[in-house]
Image (cartoon, rainbow, N blue to C red):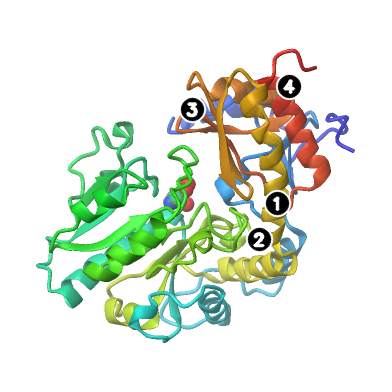
Amino acid sequence: MYQTIIDQEIKGFSDIPDETIIRYEENCGAHHYERIPMVVRQADGCWLTDMNGQKYLDCLAAYSAANLGHHHPDVVKALISAFKGCYGSVISNVVYTDSLGLFLERVSKFVPQLGPRFGNNGNKVLPKNGGVESVETAIKAARYYGWKNKGIEDGKQQIIVFKNNFHGRMITVVSFSTKQKYKEGFGPVTPGFTAVPFGDLEAVKKAVTPNTCGILVEPMQGEGGMNVPPPGFLKGLRQIADQNDLMLLFDEIQVGLGRTGKRFCFEHENVVPDGLILGKALSGGLVPLSVFVTNKKIMDMIFKPGSDGSTYGGYPLACVAAIAALDVFEKEKLEERSEKQGNKLLKRLKKLETRSPYVKQVRGRGLFIGIEVKDGNAMQFCRQLLKLGMLANDSHGHTIRISPPLTINDVELDFMCERLEKVLIPGIE
Ligand SMILES: Cc1ncc(COP(=O)(O)O)c(C=O)c1O
């Protein structure tokens, strides 16, 4: 079916030529992304199409935002109904909407009881737009908790984070990035964070002080190089958090919602955090939406009218999309699919470790797999893959990131593996 990758002429939103689009962006847009010169005109399922009708297998899925595949028909249908029925637009936050109520109820139960040490009270959800906003909400929560519950002087709260972390791009979050280029020249940075090596429990223990109020971690690092933590790491963090009365916050914006073969990545170690951050795929890849979820008791202690808010956070269209997306997630058993397809893929790609002279290590969970290359330049292989009809990019410079939509089928997996083998094993045609 996908042998011939040029099959029809596609226009998409406009018929303006690619060169003009690229020129418009160069002349009128901030140059904050290094783009590959490819202009996507349509996206459907696991495939992206350019103006000439050339198809590319999307092995990036917008960094997990397109877990359901592009334009999943159920989510599209829900959105069209919202427009037709006039219940999609943003509504002043002084009144209620049924879509938000239904969404909050759904998400609070979709997540296991968080912070069980605070009681089996159920969860509460605070909605925002982009993921970084919910990371900041989580940071606010941990700081407030430290002040109110632990008696830390306000302004002295400390949160432990990890080297090579990625939690977004706003000032507070880049303040504790360990990548200099994310923050250089953007000071003054926000204080209150201590970064220790990912996976190093001894370093975490040493970093705890009387002012520590929380630990913020990605249960598997995505941008940091597709890093699976050593076994027992999350459990160890849970123990340290319990012993020192810290809020344990998991950022599952990229690795949650089935990406690693479980509904949530923390299930690999059977631990639950006190606070959970979700985004990206939550609204089916069609509108932005993110959430911070925590134990009802904690949410009620921290957030009161005036202490947080967002005009579009939890607006009807996003909630309608998210309810439809969660329905798809459950109906199509995407976490099981991710585990099954991911296991097949990992088994096949692992062979590259011995067969390819370029590959240092293949690692991953579910459909979140990294191929680390020996010379540290993963992007050169990604450019070759693009020419063969497959979109992937690098993670941390040295690793090819493979994270296709969770709906990927066997034919598409074969398509992907054939191209990776062509590029990574010399002599394969
Ligand atoms: C783990 C993690 N946290 C936070 C973010 C930021 O999300 P957003 O770009 O939606 O603000 C990302 C984005 O890639 C992410 O991977």
Q: Which of the marked residues, 3 or 2, is nearer the chain's N terminus?
A: 2
Name the residue: 71% across, 65% down. 333
According to the image, label 3 marks what residue? 398
Q: Amino acid at mark 3?
A: His
Q: Percent x, y for residue 245? A: 24, 71
The CA span between labels 4 and 1 is 25 Å
| Mark 3–mark 2 CB contact (< 8 Å) | no
Q: Quadrant of residue 19?
A: top right
Task: Read off the residue under disc 1.
Answer: 69
Residue 356 pos. (x, y %): 64, 21
Dot 4 corresponds to which residue?
422
Given the image, on which type of amino acid does mark 2 rest? Glu
In 3D space, how far apart are the residues under numbered discs 1 and 3 (Cα atoms)? 26 Å
Identify the residue at the far top of this view: 427
On the image, the x and y values in percent for residue 327 come to 69, 70
Q: Amino acid at mark 4?
A: Lys
- In primary-sequence order, the first of circles 1 and 3 is 1
Alpha-carbon neighbours of circle 4 within 10 Å: few (<14), some, or many (≥20)?
Answer: some
Residue farthest along the right direction in this orientation: 1
Q: Which residue corresponds to mark 2?
A: 335
Q: Nearer the viewer, residue 390 or 24?
A: 390
| Mark 3: few/some/many CA within 10 Å (<14, 14-19, 20+) | many
Report the residue at 79% width, 28% height from top.
Answer: 52
- The mark that comes first in sequence, 1 or 2, is 1
Q: Nearer the viewer, mark 1 or mark 3?
A: 3
> Which residue is more in the foreground, 325 or 277?
277
Relative to 63, is 216 above or below? Answer: below
